[in-house]
Image: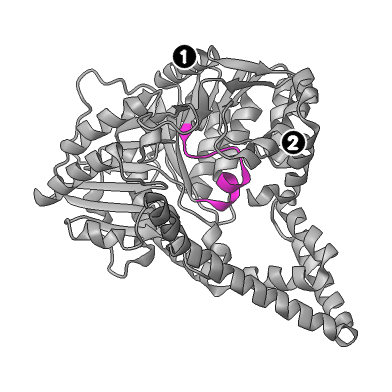
Amino acid sequence: MKKLRGLLRIIFGRTTFLVLFLLIQFGVLMAGFNWLREYMIYVYGGSSLLSAVVLIYIISNDENSSIKLSWVVPILIIPVFGTLFYLFLKLQPGVKLINRRIQYLAKEVEPFLIQDPEVMEDYKSISSSEGNLARYMNRYGKFPVYKNTSVEYFPLGDDMYPKMLEELKKAEKFIFMEYFIVERGLMWNSILEVLEQKAKEGVEVRFMYDGMCSLALLPYSYPKTLRARGIKCKMFSPVKPALSSYQNNRDHRKICVIDGHTGFTGGVNLADEYINKKERFGHWKDTAVMLKGDAVASFTMMFLQLWGVTEMEKEDYGRFLVPKDYRLPEGADSTGFVMPYADSPLDGENVGEQVYLDILGHAKRYVHIMTPYLILDDVTLTALKYAAKRGVETIIIMPHIPDKLYAYLLARTYYEELLRAGVKIYEYTPGFIHAKMFISDDEKAVVGTINLDYRSLYLHFECAAYLYKNTTVLTVEEDFQATLGMCQPVTVEECRRYSPLKRFAGKALRLFAPLM
């Protein structure tokens, strides 16, 4: 009976109807294509001309070459349908309107993200080349570099979870939370209990999660449930039964801000596998950081910018800044610099990728990387190989037990090429790596939400914290070395022994890599 109820839930569930409606729309497009084929004699010339114009536009467009290729191939193979489908997705006004709204909000928060000139001078005095990165982030990302910020690193979600609960219980004015995945269980239920209690105490609680959760993890009406408990809640980009390129731009960020002075980010979502209370793919290795002090202002403004996309009332941003009388906890280490930053898929500036490329380009001794996915464009692939070829120890830790088979097969297609260039690749044998980290030369580290794949670098809203000359960098590197001790190396010989069928499947998937 229980299995029958589960089957009926799947058959009549919202996800099934969503997929059905999407298939119907795709079918209508195919029917239109077949109709055009019947009149191909009359429309052949026009369609060929249109395809040529579209191809010229794609090739000359300021976009990643791999993404261009993913459109050029179908347009050349099935010109009419490929061209119409491209135009259908690219000419939707919704994406342009949302981007316009986000850009407007970016202008609104800009006065609250002004670079302190003294901090910048200190930053540049240590390293002129690092000053170049900061200037780029100031100009194109609008994110300042901060001092007066302490950083605590968590090598597992298991470690972050109790600390987050502790800090949430201390909230006096407001709590902002923004997450990609939320699933009911021990972790989320205990956090929700605190949020509900804080709302009763008069603390302003805002909670936002990505609309993909509504497909399988949460009811579509879940925001109403939380609002009834005093929590301001919304889904970012609810999934709707309509073919739209905007629905590909998910909110992959993980942000928690408390009273303007304490913030969390990293790879940890709000579900039990992230704290190893539920086993899905062996041991779940994830990481996070807690910031206290001036740098939290950037995370506050990141949250308010996306929150405001669907809000009509003007926000009083100033009341959410770090309190002027706030002092770091006694004994807190605030050495070095911290630069929180976000990346938007709609602004044409690939901030997340540029930070990674900057680290690879300036590394002198080593670059150590943890990532769950390895789906690379030519630029990042070349940067990784070049770092190794010029003598920089370049190590990537990947999962041994993947969560997505297609992503793992695709990642393995890059292994042999990277290994031949001198990049070292290890797999985490206890289970799944979900951490997204770069560490270099005992000087700099990035901990955040940005994977080494197209979706993170080009399609999702993301965020991270960049640490420079901060003592926490050494803690992050110590964890990397400890994790390396639980990994097995991948060799060129092992790559060549890998199943020919799986190797072929991975190479075939490379055609669709920009969509993964």
Report whether 327 appears left or right of 133. Answer: left
For the record, the magenta segment spans: 447-460
- Mark 1 surroundings within 10 Å by alpha-carbon count, few (fewer than 14), some (14 through 19), many (20 or more): some
* Residue 19, image x, y percentages: 54, 64
* Residue 493, image x, y percentages: 79, 18
Report whether 280 appears left or right of 47. Answer: left
Residue 151 visible from this viewpoint: no
Tag on residue 502?
2
Q: Quadrant of residue 89?
A: bottom right
Q: Nearer the viewer, residue 12 or 293?
A: 12
Q: Quadrant of residue 425?
A: top right
Q: Nearer the viewer, residue 391 or 433?
A: 433
Q: Residue 396: within the magenta?
A: no
Q: Which amino acid, mark 1? A: Glu
Tag on residue 478?
1
Q: What residue is drawn where x is 20% and y is 30%?
A: 327
Q: Report helix, strand or loop for mark 2.
A: helix
